[in-house]
Image (cartoon, rainbow, N blue to C red):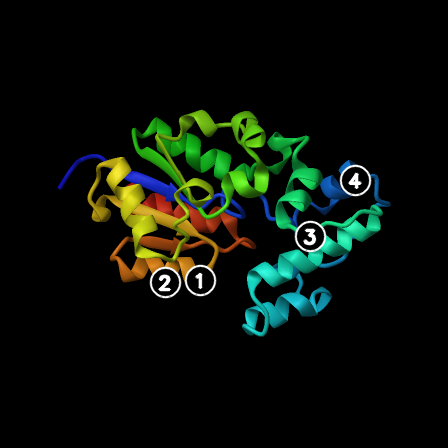
Amino acid sequence: MTSERALILDFGGVVTRTLFETHEITERTLGLPQGSLTWLGPFDTVTDPLWVAMQNREITERDYWLTRAAEIGRMVGENWSDMQTFVRRARGAEPELVLRPEARDAILRAKEAGLKLAILSNELDLFYGAEFRKRFPLIDLFDVIVDATYTKILKPDPRAYEQVLSELGLPREACVFVDDQKKNIEGAEAVGLPHVHFDVTRPAESYARALAMLGL
């Protein structure tokens, strides 16, 4: 067993605050009146029947976000037919405000303890754009970034997890993978990769659990 260990993080929702948590940034950036965006997903399901439909698998996660993107596009008088327009326009200007404070703490702590750090994302550059990523605080601390924007291999495909392990050069038991989507956690389970199902409503607890599993 290697003495080296690694923390492998999903990006959207785990390293960044979710789009539900940054309505005030979105409204300010797009020049919308404060309080225009009322849907809060997992933070208050009563405000968000569409989110409930997604949780019940009546619509896909992709459908959910395309609907939201189209709605906000209409609010600013534009036609937004993809997710990346929404993400880049809503939060591209202020990467540092999008970083989760709990993520900052965990990443710095992991780095200080000599752990390797990796990102395993389905859409990092697709949604956020390469410019955003380059300006994102702490991005230089990551040893490995595996982004399906380029690999075209989406979690929960087993090959996505195998690729990040191969680039880290570590056995799976030396790593912990953190993701907020249940299907991606099921993918990690299928390949025997230790994992934490990240709870966006309790980020500090989820990070504490991941670090504890890595001996911190």
Left or right, 141 with respect to 20, comes to left
Q: CA distance from mark 2 to mark 1?
A: 6 Å
CA distance for labels 4 and 3: 17 Å
Mark closest to the chain's N terminus, 4 or 3:
4
Picture residue at 28% right of the left edge, 53% below the top: 193
In the rendered image, which residue does mark 4 sit on?
30
Task: Kindly identify the amino acid type of the residue bearing the numbered disc 4.
Answer: Leu
Residue located 27% across and 36% down the image: 168
Q: Earlier in the sequence, mark 4 or mark 2?
A: 4
Which residue in the rendered view is the most extreme toward the left?
A: 1
Residue 156 is situated, as x and y percent measured from the top left of the image, at 38, 58
Given contact means CB atoms under 8 Å apart, are the residues at marks 4 and 2 in contact? Answer: no
Q: Amino acid at mark 2?
A: Glu
Q: Earlier in the sequence, mark 3 or mark 1?
A: 3
Estimate the spatial distance between the alpha carbons at disc 4 and disc 1, rounded to whole Å.
31 Å
Marker count (numbered):
4
Neighbour class for label 3 at 10 Å: few (<14), some, many (≥20)? some
- Residue under label 1: 182
**Residue identified by numbered label 2:** 186
Could you tell whether 96 is left or right of 134 in the image? right
Residue 187 vs 124, above or below: the answer is below
Disc 1 crowd rating (10 Å Cα; few below 14, some 14-19, many 20+) is: few
Callout 2 touching callout 1 (CB < 8 Å): yes
Identify residue type, mark 3: Ser
In this rendering, which labeled residue sits more in front, label 3 or label 2? 3
Quadrant into which the C terminus falls: top left
Q: What is the x, y in percent for residue 65?
A: 63, 56
Q: Earlier in the sequence, mark 3 or mark 2?
A: 3
